[in-house]
Image (cartoon, grey):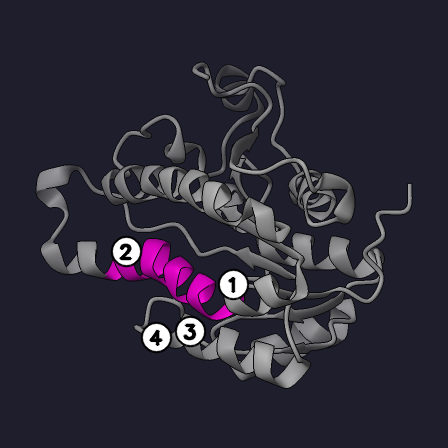
């Protein structure tokens, strides 16, 4: 199937490793001009060369206004942007009384405000061109609270509401908004847990970890013109872990 993505321009945040890198690689295979993001120029340059990205914009999304600066620069440098994929690392664990107010501020900036900053810069250009795809890579915590992930549970659930609100407002402009909810995925963060095969089968009905490429392929389809009627959705790629709707 030709996804009609050749020549589209994408900015993929948090894409020097794991799920973000897989999304960037999947888009590149479809002919998208992908610009990646990571915290340092050195890492971005290395990964960009490895995967054939068009370029990169380095910056730490936990720092205020960095997402705005990166997105504005992308739009100005490239004459617009067609696809935005937001993606940040998981926050620190902690029950409510263990999480400091400072940690709340840091996670709010990283998980929530960086998304809002990005949208403020990208949406005017997308409206003008009549095409846009916004994909937010979040977590199962956006639908079901996970033990010990208080800030993630609260902030990511709010993004689901934001996406539905934005879909109502911008669908007429040819812009879609969707959340991607990865389950237990075969990334370095999961590998560090050293989960046994028995434990994985106990947690995941599918009996295995997901591969980053499985989420990436879904993201690439949603980024395409073929997915223009899919918006405001929270889509789990989790092997059946979620029990609710």
* CB-based contact (under 8 Å), mark 2 and mark 3: no
* CB-based contact (under 8 Å), mark 2 and mark 4: no
* Residue that carries the numbered disc 2 in the rendered image: 107
* CB-based contact (under 8 Å), mark 3 and mark 1: no
Which callout, 2 or 3, points to the residue nearer the camera? Answer: 3
Q: Which of marks 2 and 3 is nearer the N terminus?
A: 3
- Taking 111 as reference, is 47 above or below it? below
Q: Distance between the residues labelled 2 and 3?
A: 17 Å
The residue lying at 58 percent from left, 59 percent from top is 84
Can residue 72 be seen in the rendering of this structure? yes
Q: How far apart are marks 2 and 4 (CA)?
A: 14 Å
Task: In the displayed orientation, state which residue is furthest to the left.
Answer: 97
Which callout, 2 or 1, points to the residue nearer the camera? Answer: 1
* Residue that carries the numbered disc 3 in the rendered image: 68
Q: How far apart are marks 1 and 4 (CA)?
A: 16 Å
In the foreground, 202 or 216: 216
* CB-based contact (under 8 Å), mark 2 and mark 1: no
* Residue that carries the numbered disc 4 in the rendered image: 65
Magenta stretch, residue numbers: 106-122
Please tell me the numbered disc located at residue 206.
none
Q: How far apart are marks 3 and 4 (CA)?
A: 5 Å
Classed neighbour count for the residue bearing mark 1: other residues with Cα under 10 Å, few (<14), some (14–19), many (≥20):
many
* CB-based contact (under 8 Å), mark 3 and mark 4: yes
* Residue that carries the numbered disc 1 in the rendered image: 123
State whether the magenta stretch is mostly helix, strand or loop. helix
């Amino acid at each position: 199937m030709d996804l009609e993505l050749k020549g589209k321009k994408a900015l993929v945040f948090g894409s020097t490793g794991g799920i973000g890198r897989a999304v960037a690689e999947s888009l590149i295979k479809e002919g998208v001009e992908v610009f990646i993001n990571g915290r340092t120029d050195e890492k971005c340059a290395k990964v960009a060369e490895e995967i054939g990205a068009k370029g990169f914009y380095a910056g730490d999304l936990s720092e205020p206004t960095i997402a705005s600066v990166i997105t504005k620069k992308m739009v100005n440098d490239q004459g617009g942007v067609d696809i935005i994929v937001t993606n940040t690392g998981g926050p620190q664990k902690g029950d409510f009384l263990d999480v400091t107010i400072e940690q709340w501020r840091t996670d709010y900036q990283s998980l929530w405000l960086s998304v809002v900053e990005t949208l403020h810069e990208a949406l005017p250009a997308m409206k003008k061109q009549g095409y846009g795809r916004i994909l937010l890579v979040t977590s199962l915590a956006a639908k079901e609270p996970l033990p010990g992930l208080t800030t993630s549970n609260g902030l990511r659930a709010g993004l689901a509401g934001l996406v539905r609100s934005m879909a109502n407002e911008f669908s007429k402009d040819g812009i879609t908004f969707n959340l991607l909810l990865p389950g237990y995925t075969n990334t370095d963060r999961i590998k560090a847990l050293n989960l046994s095969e028995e434990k994985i089968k106990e947690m995941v009905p599918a009996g295995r970890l997901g591969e980053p490429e499985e989420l990436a392929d879904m993201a690439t389809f949603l980024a395409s013109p073929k997915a223009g009627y899919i918006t405001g959705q929270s889509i789990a790629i989790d092997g059946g872990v979620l029990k609710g709707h």
